[in-house]
Each structure stands twice: as C-alpha cells, then as structure tokens.
Amino acid sequence: IKYLDRFMMFYIRTADKLTRTAPWLENLEGGIDYLKAVIIDDKLGLNAHLEEEMARLREAVVCEWTETVNTPSAQTRFKHFINSDKRDP
C-alpha cells in the first residue's frame, strides 16, 4: 500500500493537470525504471514526504453519504426519494 500511496502522490505532484497516468508514465523521463527508483528506492528522498501528504489527504476526506446519514437536517434534501416509487421530475 505504501508504494501505491507514494505513486499517487508523486503522480499528483508531477503530472500536468488532466493528464492520465499512462501518458504521464510514457512521457516520464527514465520511464518505469526511474519511477521504480523514486518510489521503491527513494532516489529523490521524498518517500516520507509523499506518505505524509497522502495521510493528510486521507484524514481530510469527508464521505458525503456518511455525513448525510448521520445528519438529519441533511437528509431533508433526499426526503422525496425515501421510500417512494415516484420518479424524480
């Protein structure tokens, strides 16, 4: 899992906006060997930082559905759907 965390954060930090992972990797100088050196061998000395960044992101995530289920006032937005066979207009 830590390799995936490192990979995702390295990708987020180095890819151009809206660039998918495959084209990003194809254009990454050094390709998969460079990526392996960065993610597994800690070539750039960033792994601890990448893992910390991912941990912060994970802590900041709020599940909207959990919040809705646990907050009665938020459930009113969905009241017309609850136990109804009617279609949404």
Image (cartoon, grey):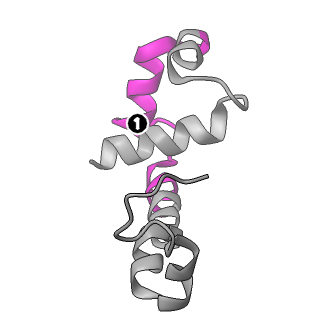
For residue 41, which quarter of the picture? top left
Q: Is residue 68 above or below residue 44?
A: below
| Residue 21 location (% of width, % of height) | 52, 23
Q: How many marks?
A: 1
- In the rendered image, which residue does mark 1 sit on? 39
Crowd tier of the residue under label 1, counting other residues whose Cα lies within 10 Å: few below 14, some 14–19, many 20 or above:
many
Residue placed furthest toward the right:
17
**Residue furthest top as drawn:** 26
Q: Is residue 31 magenta?
A: yes
User: Is residue 63 at all visible to an observer of this figure?
Assistant: no
Instruction: Name the chief secondary structure element in magenta.
Output: helix
Q: Is residue 77 left or right of residue 69?
A: right
Magenta residues (range): 27-52
Q: Nearer the viewer, residue 15 or 50?
A: 15
| Vertical placement of residue 35 versus 56, above or below | above
Q: Quadrant of residue 74?
A: bottom right
Q: Position of residue 67 (x, y in %)?
A: 46, 79
Residue 71: where, in percent of width, then height? 47, 88
Q: Residue at x 52, y 63 (%)?
A: 57
**Residue 86 appears at what percent x and percent y?**
45, 57
Q: Is residue 54 above or below residue 74?
A: above
